[in-house]
Every structure is written in structure tokens, then in C-alpha cells.
Image (cartoon, rainbow, N blue to C red):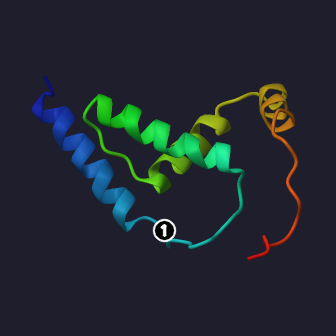
Amino acid sequence: MATSFQATSSESARDAAKTKGKLVRDSFTMPQQDFGLIAVLKDRALGFKRPAKKSELLRAGLHALQQLTDTQLRGALDSLAPLKAGRPKK
């Protein structure tokens, strides 16, 4: 059960996040298998009754990557299959 202090502090943190910084729109390419992980993670979040948007999952992933050591980050990056540069053909 959340105390009133916890609820107030989380609400103020949410309000600060809404007013903090300009939003940036971007697009990127990823393999179908990686894109499918987004749906899997959204389903997991629904399992504990916390709906998540794609952007929230990507942002959470960035924050998790930031916590890694340089060696761990390099290992995570090296485990990815390389992609061709440029836009995919339609």
C-alpha cells in the first residue's frame, strides 16, 4: 500500500517528467524478431496490470542499458546482428 508521501512524490515526479525537456520524434529500423519482443514485453506488463507503450519500453530499455558497465554494454551491442545501413526498400 502506498503512503500518501509516496503517492505525492511519485505524482510530482510524473508532473516534472511531463514538463521536462522537448520531445524528439525519430524513426529507426530493427529486425522483425526484435520488433516482436515489444509485443512480448507489452504482454508481460499487462500481466502485472501496467499497460506499456512502445516508447515506454524503449525508454526503459535505454535506462537499463545506461546502468551497465562498459564491458556489459559492449557485450550487449556485440550480441546484436548487424543491419544494412539505409532505408529498407518498399
Q: Residue 88: x percent and y percent?
A: 78, 70
73 vs 39: above or below? above
Residue at (82%, 31%) from the top-left corner? 70
Residue at (29%, 29%) from the top-left corner? 48
62 vs 68: above or below? below
Residue on which the image places disc 1 = 21
In the picture provided, is 8 more to the left or to the right than 55?
left
Q: Residues within 10 Å of mark 1 (few under 14, many from 20)?
A: few
From the image, which quarter does the N terminus lie in? top left
Q: Residue 2: x percent and y percent?
A: 15, 27
Q: Residue 6: x percent and y percent?
A: 21, 33
Q: Quadrant of residue 61?
A: top right
From the image, which quarter does the C terminus lie in? bottom right
| Amino acid type at mark 1 | Gly
**Which SS class for mark 1?**
loop
Q: Quadrant of residue 19?
A: bottom left
Residue at (70%, 29%) from the top-left corner? 68
Q: Quadrant of residue 43?
A: top left
In the picture provided, is 50 more to the left or to the right than 86?
left
Residue at (81%, 39%) from the top-left corner? 80
Count of picture labels? 1
Q: Residue 66: x percent and y percent?
A: 66, 39
